[in-house]
Structure formats: C-alpha cells, structure tokens
Amino acid sequence: MIHCRSLLLVLLIGGSLLLSACGFHLRGDTQLKVASIYLNAPKNSAITLEANRLLRANGVKTTENEKDAELILDILNEGQEQSILTFTSAGVAREIELRYRLTFRVRGPSGEVLIDSKQLNFRRELLTSEGFALPREAEQLALYKDMKSDAVQQIVRQLEFIKMPPKKVAEPQ
C-alpha cells in the first residue's frame, strides 16, 4: 500500500515537471508597452468601438489627436463578403461562406512605420434552414461581429511585440 502511494506521488510530481518543462503556459493578459494610441479609423465603426474597448481593458488610453499618442493605428481597409457554397433542391442557399478582411498599419509618433500594411483574413461558414431568414440574418451579424473581435485581438497581440523607437530628449540650449 505504501509502495503504491509513493509510486503515485512520483508519477504526479514527474508529470507536473514534464508539463512545466515543455514551456506550456496560458496566454494571459496582453502586456502593451504603450500608454496611448490614436485610432485612425471611422469614429463609430464596429472595429473602432471594439478596439477602444480592448485597448482600455489593457490599460491603454485612446487619444483624439495623433500628436498626443505614442502609436498610431491606421485602419486602411475593411470589408466583408459572402458567397453561397451550396443550394437546396429548391434553389435556396443552404450553406453560406462569410469573409471579413481588415488591412492595418502601425506608425510611431513621428510617422515612422512600425508595422507595415498587413491584411487579416477571416472566414466562417453558416448553415441555413428554409423559412428562417431572420435568425440567419442575426447569426450573420453575430459571426461578422465575432470576426471583427478576432481581428482586434490579433492587432493588439501584434502591438505587444513592437520595438518602440527611443524617445528623443530635447537638448538644453
């Protein structure tokens, strides 16, 4: 009995050590190195509202003016499309593919490009039922909102790894 307990203890400790040795850890919160960001995007768009929410949750202030910000996030292009993948025998759309694309760039306060123009692409499939047009519309909106949220999360994760240019110190005259 004592031998079984000690063997179980050794296996439990050994398993814990192996798991921690492989470098596994949960992602956790994003640690941004900036205190303020200017969002160069339409003010009341869904992407701007989501970016504001996520940045504030990470302790980053969004400014109203480029000159007051440590970083400038430019939303260069945003688009959503859909295409029908399959039809029913009655010719009604059965399966729809939703696509969302976002192109962005990150600049420093003096205009230097820190992250060159990048395009993020997302895709979701939606199965529909005949006679349920309203629930399909609501589900489409929810899927597009989810893709926009994913886009903002990816941008914020990329902001974590920006190497900030050194701040210029004014020389005394």
Image (cartoon, grey):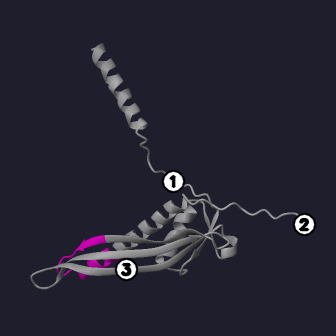
Is 140 contained in the magenta span? yes
Q: Position of residue 126 (x, y in %)?
A: 25, 73
Q: Which residues are magenta?
A: 124-141
Q: Nearer the viewer, mark 3 or mark 2?
A: 2
Q: Kindly identify which residue carries mark 3.
A: 80
Residue that appears at 24% across and 82% down? 133
C-alpha separation, residue under disc 1 versus residue under disc 2: 43 Å
Name the amino acid, label 2.
Gln
Residue 173 is marked as: 2
Q: Kindly identify which residue carries mark 1.
A: 29
Name the amino acid, label 1.
Asp
Q: Nearer the viewer, mark 3 or mark 1?
A: 3
Asked if labels 1 and 3 touch by Cβ distance under 8 angstroms, the answer is no
**Tag 3 secondary structure:** strand
User: Which numbered disc, 1 or 2, marks the residue that appears first in the sequence?
Assistant: 1
User: In this view, which residue lies farthest toward the right?
Assistant: 173
C-alpha separation, residue under disc 3 versus residue under disc 2: 54 Å
User: Which numbered disc, 3 or 1, marks the residue that appears first in the sequence?
Assistant: 1
